[in-house]
Amino acid sequence: MKDYETLPPIVVDHGKGVWLFDIYGNKYLDIVSSWWCNLLGHCNPDINNAIKNQIDNLEHVIFANFTHKPAIEVAQQLSKIVPSKLKKFHFNDNGSAAIECALKMCFQYFLQTGKPKKQHFMCLTNGYHGETIGALSVGALDLYTELYRPLMLHTFPIEAPDCYRCKFGQCRGKCQCECIADAESVFEQHADETAAIILEPLLQGSAGMRVYPPLYLKKLRKLCDDYDVLMIADEIATGFGRTGKMFACDHAEISPDVMCLSKGLTGGYMPMSVTCVSQEIYDAFYDDYNTGKAFMHSHTYAGNPMACAASLAVQKILREQNILQTANDNAKWLTNALNEALGDNPNVGEIRHIGLIHAIELVKDKNNKTPFDSKRRLGYSVYKRALKYGLLLRPLGDVLYFNPPLIISREDLTFAIDVTKRSINEMINQ
């Protein structure tokens, strides 16, 4: 809160495309998609019209023994694009709720299939899955979790891949994922008491946009199969084209047992999430209500008709407007442009990327990959300077990142690169 004394909240008046405009007429390029959810630009006319049309028909209805056409169509459309194993869809109203839903399902699944010992969860270090207690429990970033540890579930952490600082001395993209060894050890020790492993596939967002190879995900899938552990893929941040494919799991050609979706699901317009599950998991809950097998998890705004209308518009745009191909073309261009602009900077340790998502890790010593003292808050200083020049560049520590709407133009990306370079140089040289 004290930071607001020197950097008061910016009051936004309206948005258009990739730009935000404040009440004083200043404009800011939203290179972070307003916390990664604004998939297709602010005030997208197609999504706007879908919500306007829906509100005249139905704004909300109890989602228990009642449903509505937009929710049915969302499930039908998702069934065509999610990994093949996923057949059933549970609606909620935010990402953390989708995670809580997934954890409860996996626990109850084993309870109802004769394996009551499987009560715990594995997770990757540096993972982030939300900020409700269950979601915090399967995350592993001290910034969010340390204070609440006495309240949290017991989990089995697996050391996550770190391709920039690989402890095996391997180079990104040129290894056999030797780092799977820690996962193999944890599975061997604890699989008999583990219901599921939860992970962010290929991209650990809040950890600093850490990108790891599809091969690691393939190997984890095999461990899950060998040890009878369910895989929960948290695609809340990576879904709907963010990584260059519809879902990050598609890069590894694997299907999780559970997948959590939110953020881009509605284009960032309205809160909604979906937990997608396999037929096998669904069948474990299928019985008369009085048997006690029902899955008890309902939120007031689950399956909201207006959110569903927004989701249908998003999926229609992705199907019909070639957005993903254009974004992938721009992603390749952006990689080259960022390397040309910042690759020789002695304080830029690595520029990593997946899809349009690009991360710039600032370091004190490039050769040794030595980070800056955290007390300096260099990333935060760059963020404040970039705001002065009209760029919303919200850092993760000393990692600056681009995660723009998929519709961003090369002209706007060029502006973002120029401001980022200028802001880095000015703040490092202060």
Image (spheres, grey):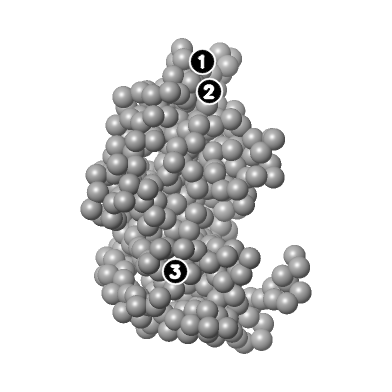
Closest to the observer: 5 or 83? 5
Give the residue displayed 50% in from the left and 48% down from the top: 126
Q: Identify the residue under disc 3.
A: 365
Relative image position of residue 124 (x, y in whole percent): 46, 41
- Secondary structure under tag 2 reads loop
Q: Quadrant of the C terminus?
A: bottom right
Question: Relative to 136, is 370 on the left or the right?
Answer: left
Give the residue displayed 56% in from the left and 48% down from the top: 141
Q: Identify the residue under disc 1.
A: 116
Rate crowding at label 2 as few (under 14), some (14 to 19) or many (20 or more) other CA atoms within 10 Å. Answer: many
> From what the image shows, is residue 109 above or below residue 243?
above
Q: CA distance from mark 2 to mark 1?
A: 7 Å
Relative image position of residue 313 (x, y in whole percent): 42, 59
Q: Identify the residue under disc 2.
A: 119
Give the amino acid type for the residue marked by disc 3 in the picture.
Answer: Asp
Rate crowding at label 1 as few (under 14), some (14 to 19) or many (20 or more) other CA atoms within 10 Å. Answer: some
Give the amino acid type for the residue marked by disc 1 in the picture.
Answer: Pro
